[in-house]
Amino acid sequence: MMIPLKDDNPTETTPYVTLGIIGINIIVFIYQLSLGPRGDQLFIYRTGIIPYEFTHAVDLPPYAGHALIFNLIAAMFMHGGFLHIFGNMLYLWIFGNNVEDAMGHFRFIVFYLLVGILASLTHILLMPDARVPMIGASGAISGILGAYFVLFPWAKVHTLIFLIIFVTVVQIPAMFVLGFWFVFQFLNVFGRGNVAWFAHIGGFLSGMILVRFFLKRKYRFRGTVFRKV
């Protein structure tokens, strides 16, 4: 198992948007906790993404009382537990600040929401009859990972590695850390559990494809990578 801890990739600007998104996620999670187990479950079913509702144009009970399209955004800021939000926010902080730096604050907001929506739509299209709510920032963050993979493939990532009883921290190029992460999503896509693997894959690919349209002008595509000019 590999867990990224930080990268050696300094930024030129303060990642206000990345910090803001992390803050919103934490606030929403605290709100979920305040609802209690039963209230949180109702909140998730009313505000999370249930593919069946989108593909059959119905609002399943407990009824949301609002347009389903609202859930495409709201679900990105909801989480199912401490490990869920911690893992997502860790990945967002490590990789999001550099992508925001390369795009600028406003473009980064648009990019984040767009790849998050595309990730959710991938899950909906490939799991059209699923009735389990999908929540979490991981679809949008997958898009950030895809963008980072294209922009900074050789950036060194300090990674915690577990090999049976052997534990160590090593510096690994981002292309291998994120490449391993992407392969892991494919290996688990037909496995059991409530993880939206298709959303992760859709978000990552969306980020790789769309990143070039959101970069600052000083970035140009040269050879196989983007470089500053």
Image: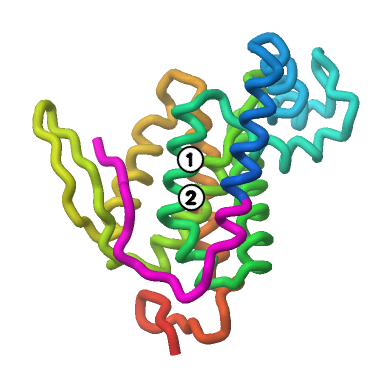
- Place residue 135 in its image quadrant: top right
Q: Which residues are magenta?
A: 1-20
| Residue 35 coordinates in the image, percent (x, y) | 71, 17
What amino acid is at disc 1?
Answer: Asn
**Residue 17 sits above or below residue 142 on the image:** below
Q: Nearer the viewer, residue 203 or 43?
A: 43
Instruction: Specify few, some or many for label 1: CA neighbours under 10 Å numbering under 14, 14-19, or 20 or more.
Output: many
Say which residue appears at 14% left-offset and 36% top-offset: 167
| Residue 215 coordinates in the image, percent (x, y) | 56, 75
**Residue 73 sits above or below residue 44 on the image:** below
| Residue 28 coordinates in the image, percent (x, y) | 67, 34
The answer to whether any part of residue 49 appears in the image is yes
Residue at the disc numbered 2 = 92
* Image quadrant in which the N terminus is located: top left
Residue at the disc numbered 1 = 88
Report the side of 29 relative to 145 (left or right).
right
The answer to whether any part of residue 130 appears in the image is no
Dot 1 falls on a residue whose secondary structure is: helix
- Place residue 151 in its image quadrant: bottom left
Instruction: Specify few, some or many for label 2: CA neighbours under 10 Å numbering under 14, 14-19, or 20 or more.
Output: many
What amino acid is at disc 2?
Answer: Leu
Within the magenta stretch, is there residue 15? Answer: yes
* Most distant residue in the right direction: 65
Say which residue appears at 65% left-offset and 37% top-offset: 27
> Would you say the residues marked 2 and 1 are in contact, meaning their CB atoms lie under 8 Å apart?
yes
| Residue 83 coordinates in the image, percent (x, y) | 44, 28
The answer for how far apart the CA atoms under marks 2 and 1 are is 6 Å
